[in-house]
Amino acid sequence: LEGFLLQKDPGTASLSARQLALCAALKKHPLFCSEAAVLCCDTKPLEANGTIIRFGLTPTDVMHVCQDYTDFNREASKAALAFFSKCSHIPLPALPGHIYDAFLKKLYTHLVQVLLKRNLPSSVPELSTDLKALIANSYDGGFPEITAGFHSGFSLIGAGGPAHLFIPGTAKKLGCEVLIHKDAMVANAIGTLAGRITVQESLELMLCCDNDKEGYRLYIDGEKHIVEAFPEAVSLATSALSRITARQAENRGAALPLDTTRQIEIYPSGPADMSRPLGATIIMRAVGSIDYTKKER
């Protein structure tokens, strides 16, 4: 469940009529993403310059409200749940159950799809839409006239803090055994110790005319830049992403040096000037081993 909040006035920024309409609506109250999409689908520039911010409600928030998991402060989770209750017109006491059930259904359908794909011939690359609908329907109990069910002989092994909340219900639906060790809450720590830290960030370049100045617009740390030439815009974005990903990776505990890769997705050129791309997305990925020499702050 996601929505948008207005963080600051859009001011005189170069925005479309739809983007301005979205900002005007958000001045009155926050909106769900589905509600915002009716007014404006292109929210990236507004998010990049900090005009609007995305917020959400996760199963972890619900766990804190229900005190099924209490490692963090509950106040933000309680406020988010109350807001979503008001917007969805679902009574606050009933909303946690709806969210838990939606998560269980998603977990069940994903597991069934994974198990089916393992047993389908290679000539069938994807499950059909009808089969996916049947899987989802089987979770809800089937049709009035007939019930379809999926069962597995596998055992489900729970790992992680919330395993005891979701694995047993999923295993019951699949008719299989569930195994949750007494130390399941810290089982993911083994993967953390053996794993690597990965950070991925992206910046979007868009050809525009801003105050009679034509060039490629991009936002870096909320600040707008207009760069006339495409190669220079790519260079600026790459330099900024290198700095941003390195800082994030180091803050997460990665050791230097980092392995970095860059990907450029160029938008098709316009009919007027085929040598000038309409824009691009620059994606930077930084990977590093965990630095165990750092002291805890």
Image (tube, grey):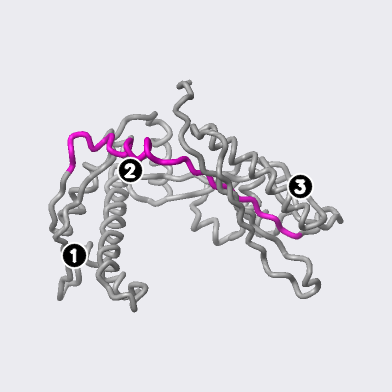
Residue drawn at point x = 54 percent, y = 56 percent:
36
Proximity of marks 2 and 3: CB atoms separated by less than 8 Å: no
Report whether 45 appears left or right of 37.
Answer: right
* Residue farthest to the bottom, as pictured: 123
x and y, in percent, of residue 208 in the image: 77, 59
In space, the residues marked 1 and 2 are separated at their CA atoms by 26 Å
x and y, in percent, of residue 114 in the image: 29, 63
In space, the residues marked 2 and 3 are separated at their CA atoms by 44 Å
Asked if residue 186 lies in the magenta stretch, the reply is: yes
Amino acid on which disc 1 is placed: Gly
Residue drawn at point x = 74 percent, y = 71 percent:
270
Please, what secondary structure does the residue beneath circle 3 have?
strand
Proximity of marks 1 and 2: CB atoms separated by less than 8 Å: no
Which numbered disc flags the more N-terminal residue, 3 or 1? 1
Which residue is denoted by mark 1 in the rendering? 141
**Is any atom of residue 2 visible in this view?**
yes
Which residue is denoted by mark 3 in the rendering? 225
Which residue is denoted by mark 2 in the rendering? 92
Front in this rendered view, residue 159 or 50:
159
Please report the bounds of the magenta region as a residue range: 180-207
